[in-house]
Image (spheres, rainbow, N blue to C red):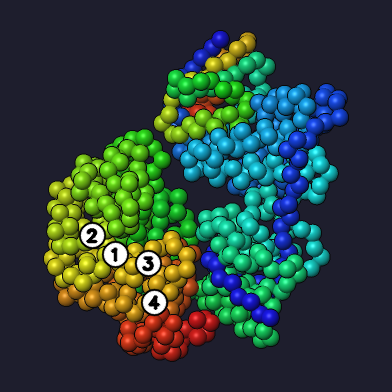
Amino acid sequence: MAQRRVTVQSEVGLHARPAALFVEAAAKAGGEVTVAKGEGTPVSAKSILAVMGLDVRKGDEIVISAEGDDADALLDRLVEIAEAG
Amino acid sequence: MPQRFKGAGVSPGAGYGPAKRLVRDVPRPDPDARHGGDAAAEAERAAAAMEETARALGELGERAGGDAAEVLNAQALMARDPALAEDVRKRVGEGASAARAVSEAMAVYREMLAGAGEYLAARVADLDDVRDRIVARLMGAPMPGVPDSDVPFVLVAEDLAPADTAALDPRRVVAFVTREGGPTSHTAILARSLGLPAVVACPGADTVAEGTMLLVDGATGEVAADPEPGVVETVTAAAQARAAAAAGAGGPGRTADGHEVPLLANIGGPKDLPAALEHGAEGVGLYRTEFLFLDRADAPGHAEQVAAYRAVLEAFPGGRVVVRTLDAGADKPLEFLPPGGRDEPNPALGERGLRMMRRLPETLDAQLAALAEAERDTDAHLQVMAPMVTDAADAEWFAAAAAKAGVQHAGVMIEVPAAALRARHIAEHVDFFSIGTNDLTQYTCAADRETGGLGRFQDPWQPAVLDLVAASAASAADAGRTCGVCGEAAADPLLACVLTGLGVTSLSMGPSALPLVRAALARAELAQCRAAAEAARAARGPEEARTAAAERLPGLAELGL
């Protein structure tokens, strides 16, 4: 299980377009992908409703976890989306 | 029988046609609905309907493009959300029909979003729309959305969702009327981008019978059902004249005889700059800074504030930018401020604006310091004003705080009648005034801005309000200070001329109102503005004031005002 911590930089947080990009990228992965706000309970990163429900704002820290062979490449992509301004 | 409705005009122009209602009535699944026993087949049916809905939303998004595409794409992701699908499958497994399972599963998420802040609450409408589309598909009901019609029509709705408007053929619609919504609703944004007239927040208009002829004036917000003969021609001609005049007006604000009245924009953040520049704003007359502070757990840092202020200053080289310091209070609570006044029984009369900042000087000092730094290395002329200033002691305190932080031009908003009446004492301490006519009207007439049914007292044409504007402007002139107006009043072209006649030196408004106000000023001489102002002040009520002013400004008649 690979894991990353990242501070969300997008003005709209993990909502709107960044949320859609995030979920679309996660949905391509074969294995389980989760995201949590800070130390909160992780939810499926493939679910837009769950991701929106976290209500992640700009400046919040999120923890992204993924399983499988392509986990690192996927996490790189997700971190990139979360860090985009 | 003619019937009239009044809402907020959010996209100018006149439209006339039969009312057609948006199809919104998707049948609700019976709360006890169960499937026939084959759970696997029913789950398959649910999954297919969700996928079909997602695909259709995606297609609508592709067709719509722009911001609508973004929303529709997010809605497509909701329809194919794996967590939602899992929940639906589970409910079907327990016996629920597909439609009921979808409805119930989405209700869980709906509750979560509705309870979590303003932004997410707005997404609830998007989610409801997705649910209605899936349920309609499962129950064989007509898809919600814009009606088909061979004849151009006035689209009437409670409110419009992005999916409704994306499927819209603009050649078939002559105007929009919605019961809900505000100037930033989807309806307003779409109407302006299509150049179609629209009136929002218009109660009653959605109750007219299908096919009733509606006349919509997107500038005044007036909607007439079955108007009398001749009215349609009058309103349409006036709208065309206004559009032509606004399109033809350019350059700095000035009266027909050359008296300059700078026309400035009210903005709520750098995001509003394109609209301000597009409509020819000469600067910013009211930069509301609350957006930096709302919906967050801590105060914005120095660098973040400097960047937000500098972005606006850089947009107006050589121009004026008037920034209002944080206007928080019981009606606009901030998470990181102590909850002192939150339980105030009457927040409008409580610890708001500068009153709040006097209790939290470090927040104000940090903002002033960021403003002073933002002005460095830009060519704009920065002015900083405090909201809700009541007396000379308030003004003196704020001016001292501004000077200490290195802000060179400090001013005050005149919103409290006490401040207007004793403006001569306030002028001793500050460089400029800006009259906030919305609050000044609320406090002068003791009528809450949000309360329905008090329309007559929420009207800046009340002669008592005009008296206070005149008193403030006169005190400013005596002391060699400027006195602007930033409020809805400045956006009313007729009233803008009256304010000029009262001695107001600049007018600041929502950017879309600028062209018509510029055109109105260009059709009035200063002496006419003064005569109109005097006549309006001599009136006994707002309607009489309007009529009296219009009679003395004959040049505005060609604008249909």
Labels 3 and 1 within one chain:
yes
User: Which numbered circle lies on residue B389?
Assistant: 2
Task: Name the secondary structure under disc 2.
Answer: loop
Q: Secondary structure at mark 3?
A: loop
- The residue carrying mark 3 is B447
Label 3 Cα neighbours within 10 Å, binned few <14 / some 14-19 / many ≥20: some
Residue B385 showing in the rendered view = no
Q: CA distance from mark 4 to mark 1?
A: 15 Å
Mark 3 vs mark 1, foreground winner is 3
Given the current orientation, which residue lies at the most extreme front position? Answer: B32
Q: In the rendered view, tell whether residue B115 sits above or below residue B426.
A: above
Marked residue nearer the N-terminal end (3 or 1): 1
Identify the secondary structure beneath mark 4: loop
Whether residue B163 is visible here, answered yes or no, is yes
**Distance from Cα at disc 3 to Cα at disc 2:** 19 Å
Real-space Cα separation, disc 3 to disc 1, in angstroms: 14 Å
Q: Is residue B53 left or right of residue B249?
A: right
The tag earlier along the polypeptide, 1 or 2, is: 2
Judged by depth in the image, the label closer to the viewer, 3 or 4, is 3
Q: CA distance from mark 1 to mark 2?
A: 7 Å
Given residues B99 and B560, the one toward you in this image is: B99
| Label 1: which secondary element | loop
* Amino acid type at image mark 4: Trp
Residue B511, picture quadrant? bottom left
Where residue B185 appears, as percent x and y from the top left, is 56, 55
| Residue bearing mark 4 | B461
Q: Is there CB contact under 8 Å for labels 1 and 2?
A: yes
Disc 1 target residue: B415
